[in-house]
Amino acid sequence: MKRQYVERVEVFRLEPRGPRAVLKAGTLLMSCRIGRNGGTHDKREGDGASPCAVMAILGGFWRADRRLPPRTGLRLRPIRGDDGWCDAPGAGAYNRPVRLPFSASHEVMTRQDRQYDVVLDLDWNRRCRRQGRGSAIFLHLMSETMGGTAGCVAMPPGRVDALMAVIGPHTRVQIR
């Protein structure tokens, strides 16, 4: 029997300019965090806000040195030690995965904190890239301080497996 996955993961902002939000995926509900400056319909690089949009999940990654892969309908690959993500507007690899070392501004995917132990690549400014419209918009694990993100959606680490089990290749993430 073919597994059924939710069509949409909805993220509802609880405050107009703050990070508190609720994530709903079918019957699954959980507290989550978005950008430290809330959500926006005019996303810009470095604005600290999450894009209010519907986004496909393009794939994901997990830290094989820290955990087993989550059970999900998505294609995931282990994060390697030389994985990075370019966040430099104007760079040819802007909003793309890169190999480290990399000369332009970038994120290191093997973070020391546990936020990228499971990380999903959301289709914000990925397939149709526009310079300066935001990069590295992910769904990842919440920080220990439970603060806002730079623009991503962050979920509680203890709930990641429950969420991953209900999402598949056609699931969309909507930030409202």
Image: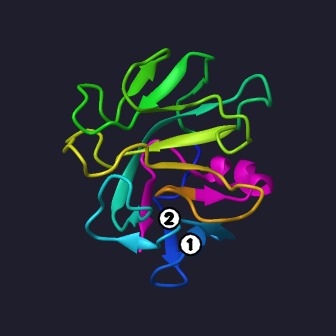
Q: Residue furthest bottom?
A: 15
Amino acid type, label 2: Gly
For the point 80% across and 29% down, which residue is it? Answer: 66
Task: Give the percent coordinates (x, y) of residue 115.
Answer: 67, 45
User: Where residue 58 sits: x, y (%)?
Assistant: 41, 38
> In the displayed structure, does residue 26 sit left or right of residue 165?
left
Residue at image point 58% right, 41% down: 119
Mark carried by residue 2? none
Tell me the distance, in whole angstroms, between the alpha carbons under discs 1 and 2.
5 Å
Q: Are marks 1 and 2 in contact (CB under 8 Å)?
A: yes
Disc 1, SS: loop
The reply to whether residue 29 is visible in this rendering is no
Q: What residue is disc 2 on? A: 35
Which badge, 1 or 2, comes first in the chain's sequence? 1
Q: Amino acid at mark 1?
A: Pro
- Which residue position is annotated with label 1? 19
Q: Is residue 72 magenta?
A: no
16 up-or-down from 63: above or below? below
Towards the viewer: 171 or 118: 118
Which residues are drawn in magenta?
A: 154-176
